[in-house]
Amino acid sequence: MFHKLTRRSPHLVKGGVEVSINWNDKIGKVGYRAGLNYSYWDERVTRHTTKSSDWWSPTFDNIGKRWMHPVYVLGVKSDGLFGDWNDMYNSFLHSTRNRTLGTIRLVDTNGDGRETDYYVLNVPGTVPLTQFGITLGADWNGFDFEVFLQGATLVSGAMPSPMRNQQDYMWNYGQYAFQHAYTPSNPDVNAALPMPAPAGNSWGYSYIDLWAFDASYLKLKNISLRYDLKRSVLKNVQSFQAMDLSFVVTNALTWTKSSYPLKGLQDPEFMVSHHNIYGAGGTLGSYPTQRSYTLSLSVTL
């Protein structure tokens, strides 16, 4: 049975919080400091405009849920990848899709034996809902050491078309993508990408929750070490007021979840990949974020 669905302008509730905490103290000659900046926001659909414009189908009912993702607000539920032939033989499969180990395991949520069980994914969009920064530092006898960590959670990406095997594009990017995919030489059922397959046997054009991947990250953004030369070495020199020698590492390390499919292709802090790399504004990856090392001498006359 098909029901006519009417789009509506829903009522939304949006809110957030920002917290900033800083602390500094001393233990003997050692000074230490710590800081935390944290922000969180969210948006949910609270009710439809009128009763007459409610969705008829519960599949599209997003009341109390997020409707944020730029592509995959809806999708078929998946449960990892197949890694056992017996398991695959006794499971729910699609007649024309890839039927080899490493293909996506779909969930028949309503028990009708079909892969049309769409549901509201209720996932965040490409703008992080949670962002945070942590500063830790200490100083002693003219030395000053500081690290800054930065991260984001509750953020999703849209799987680019080559990674979905859409129109066989993935074969052009195998050197980048296959290292994160299930393959005969890497039979990892927790791999970020399913077994590569031709477009006609893949799920590239389907709406599956796997394509809205978790893009959370944590970065060791800065490491700095500074020494005040006027503190002892040049304390008797009167021709200048201050001289600092510093060494800074920027973009030292980045951690992502194992399910992040764009490792080595895109910094999760700058999510620019489009779900269709040949569409408007489409791209795959971005110029790598560089790790830099800076040695500087600052003089105050």
Image (cartoon, rainbow, N blue to C red):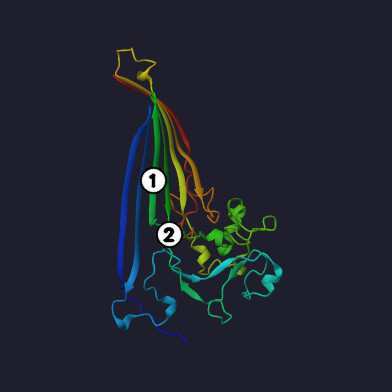
- Where does the image place residue 170, in percent across and percent down from the top left? 58, 58
Residue identified by numbered label 1: 133
Q: Residues within 10 Å of mark 2 (few under 14, many from 20)?
A: few
Tag 1 secondary structure: strand
Tag 2 secondary structure: loop
Write the residue at 37% across / 15% down. Answer: 234
**Which circle's residue, 1 or 2, is located before the other in the chain?**
1
Disc 1 residue type?
Gly
**Left or right: 191 with respect to 245?**
right
The image's mark for residue 280 is 2
Q: Residue furthest bottom?
A: 1
Write the residue at 31% across / 68% down. Answer: 12
Q: Which image quadrant for residue 134? A: top left
34 or 184, which lies in front? 34
Q: Is residue 248 above or below residue 7?
A: above
Q: Residues within 10 Å of mark 1 (few under 14, many from 20)?
A: some
Q: Which image quadrant for residue 223? A: top left
Q: Is residue 165 above or below residue 255?
A: below
- Where does the image place residue 13, in percent across and percent down from the top left? 30, 67
Q: Residue furthest front?
A: 28
Q: Is residue 168 above or below residue 39?
A: below
- Where does the image place residue 88, in percent across and percent down from the top left? 67, 71
